[in-house]
Image (cartoon, rainbow, N blue to C red):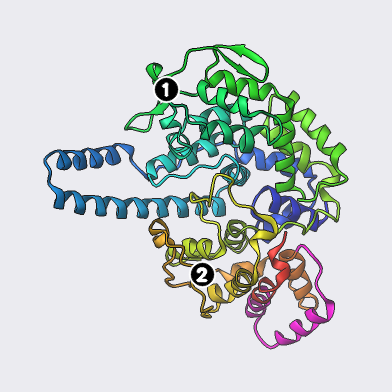
Amino acid sequence: MLQKNIQHLYWRAGFGEPYTVVRSAHRQSARQIFKKMLQDSEDFRPIDIVDMREVVAEFRKLQEMRELKKEEEVGNKLKNLQKDQKEQQGTLNTTWIDLMATSKGVLREKMALFWHGHLVSRSLNPAFSQSYLNTLRKNALGKFGDLLMAVSKEPSMLQFLNNKQNKKRSPNENFARELMELFTLGRGNYSEKDIKEVARAFTGWDFDLQGRFVFRAFQHDNDQKTIFGKTGNFNGEDVIKMILERKETAQFLTTKIYKYFVNETISGNEKRLAELSKLFYKSDYDIANLLENIFTADWFYDQENIGSHIKSPVELLVGIKRTLGATFENQQPNLFIQKVLGQVLLYPPNVAGWAGGKNWIDSSSLLFRMQLPAMLFLGKDGNISAKKDGDVNTEYQSKKQSFKASVDWNDFSKSFSEKDKNLLGEISQYLLQVPVNEQFTQNLASKFQNNSKEENIKQMAIALMMMPEYQVC
């Protein structure tokens, strides 16, 4: 298998791999590499940063203070609680970043990242965020129906899309609308009447103080509902089953997954998408099976697909850490980089998630992206600050502390050939998925001839990572 193809698979199904891993895979087929990635992702371990019992205990203390009308103490307690929650939210974010960068189960984490931008939810309660994140990670490679049902019952989702306010006498249509428009069917495959009826079916879906799903029967509308032309006393579980029975759901999901993992341009590939969708539907929405059909197909490695994907901020950040083995002195740069580049994990901009694609790049973000390697590894000051959005909940992401990152450059340099003749070409072939101007690389090579091999490789790698071509994979 060609090195470019191996790297293409590792970047799209994960976040890139160290050069030693890439080189060791050259005799394997795409199916063998994918199967190994899938096998490495079988072991699921939940992230356990936030203790829900402690969160509940703190809120109960706050409630007792309110009942005793201790207003000053309530104010101080609330301020400390909010500070603690922001810190926990930040720790949860960076813990997931580190998992993506170091875990063997990178396929699971990459797919969970996709679902985070698709089954979108946001909560200021870190316990709810943790539960939501673990549900995405646990079900990331399983059956979509199981994932959809589990996420729909998450306190984060029920709170974010107002289903806690969805009651028999005053139905709230927010969750019903987004469930069909953004999560499953897509626009044009349901009616306004369907939205109203689906909302009635989800009345009574709630959660308790501990964040556990609760069905409040006295708030549920038990009358008959007509959904997708069928009439019955449907509840939320019935609706999800009915949605999964619609082939439009498989088509909508397959198209979005294709655009994320293969190519945003789908024109001319309608037949391919139809076949993938058909297989996805027949497999009862088996996510791992769909990914295998994509990543092991010959067309996945067509030249038009390699280097066509603009790295999201998280893919860029995690890719640097994973491929180089880079570590930060503290965790704040992880948050700051996400903030500046416009993708903060657990804090999507809206229910539609991040737009992605060319929306990741503008003049200021591209400048920061290209300066980032020098800031991390050469101590250069990029003189860039995070945009102020007026949201007090994102202040913890905007603190620019030490940007210093460490890499074992000696270990990194050992991966490359001892022959210095075309060292830059070898490093370029590894770090860049698209060709660069030969004259430029020759000029670059001439700059790094008088240092040790380790120093040459370090300087070459940093210079290549500062090129626009490094921003795609």
Residue 402 placement: quadrant = bottom left
Rendered position, 53 above or below 70? above
At 86% from the left and 44% from the top, the residue drawn is 298
Measured as percent of width and height from the top left, residue 210 is found at 33, 32
Task: State the predominant SS element of the stretch in magenta.
Answer: helix
Q: Residue at x 44, y 65 (%)?
A: 398
Mark 2 or mark 1, which is nearer the start of the sequence?
Answer: 1
Q: In this view, does 207 lie above or below 124?
A: above
Which disc number belongs to residue 169? 1
- Residue 285 vs 333, above or below: the answer is above
Q: Name the residue under label 2.
A: 406
Question: Where in the figure is residue 325, as x and y percent of width and height?
Answer: 57, 62
200 sits to left or right of 431: left
On the rendered structure, is 322 left or right of 211?
right
Magenta stretch?
433-461
- Determine which quarter of the picture holds residue 255: top right
Q: Which residue shows up at 77% across the image and 66% down it?
A: 429
Measured Cα–Cα span from mark 1 to mark 2:
59 Å
Look at discs 1 and 2 and give the one toward the viewer: 1
Q: Can residue 416 be seen in this view?
A: no
Residue type for callout 1: Arg
